[in-house]
Amino acid sequence: NAGVMQNPRHLVRRRGQEARLRCSPMKGHSHVYWYRQLPEEGLKFMVYLQKENIIDESGMPKERFSAEFPKEGPSILRIQQVVRGDSAAYFCASSRSRTAADIQYFGAGTRLSVL
Amino acid sequence: DAKTTQPPSMDCAEGRAANLPCNHSTISGNEYVYWYRQIHSQGPQYIIHGLKNNETNEMASLIITEDRKSSTLILPHATLRDTAVYYCITFNFGNEKLTFGTGTRLTIIP
């Protein structure tokens, strides 16, 4: 039973380019969460999605960032026109349901470096 | 979610029990206490969670005080691989985001 899969593991972009980060949840999980971790800091919540729906995007920057979780395929976190400040580790987590008793399992993350 | 307070760092000798405290004095009745750890720069790893009762699994034990204002994570026989940052998080339905603080950096000493 594979865990949460994220790809790519490392992504290098130049300023102004687009970054696409992918997350495949664990089998049987329909809830996906994205978190960002800046160097030497804790993880910060960005967005929570259920299949085809954004449930909570209160942690997403207002511009350039978007997320989707289509009916088929992985969840995508998209960053347009990247800037150096977007350099961070982006982690995806998934859970089976949205109850507090249901555990969020994390992927290994995508490390984005903006040159 | 309730704010949690943890010591920034702790050391523990290999083979001994590591006891990591967490204060969550403003926790509400339906909030769970979750513990995760992050080894180096890997993704956070779930350890254990509980609501009121003490819990034990293959990784650790969680002791929650009767008033639920604090808890302790116990790693019974610490190994070098347990060196990590440990996060104590309170979490409830309706607010699904996990709020990570700065955690406790646990170093296991050979």
Image (cartoon, rainbow, N blue to C red):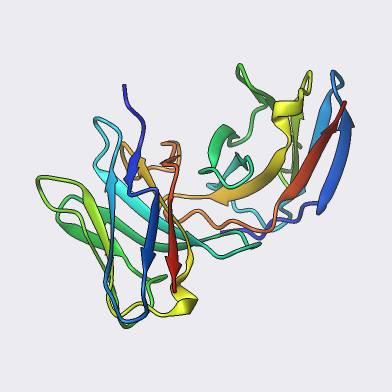
- Does residue B63 show up? no
| In this rendering, position of residue B94 left or right of residue B40 | left
- A2 and A33: which one is in front? A2
Of residues B52 and B73, the one drawn nearer to the viewer in this rendering: B73
The answer to whether residue A78 is seen in the rendering is: yes
B15 shown above or below A108? above
Which residue is pictured at 39% across the width and 48% down the height? A9
- Residue at x-position 23% and y-position 52%: A75
Left or right position of A10 against B39: left
A92 over A87 or under it: above or below:
above
Report which quarter residue A90 is drawn in: bottom left
Quadrant including the C terminus of chain B: top right
Which percent across, then down, holds residue B25? 74, 55
Name the image quarter holding residue B37: top right
- In the image, B62 versus A71, the foreground residue is A71
Q: Residue furthest left?
A: A72
Q: Quadrant of the N terminus of chain B?
A: bottom right
Q: Position of residue A64 (x, y in %)?
A: 29, 79
Answer with left or right where residue A14 lies relative to residue B22: left
- State how many labels appear: 0
Residue A40 horizontal/vertical position (percent): 66, 62
Q: Nearer the viewer, residue B101 or B43?
A: B43
How far across and how far down the image is residue A51, in percent?
Answer: 17, 50
Residue at 76% from the left image edge and 47% from the top image edge? B105
Image point 24% across, 42% down: which residue? Answer: A30
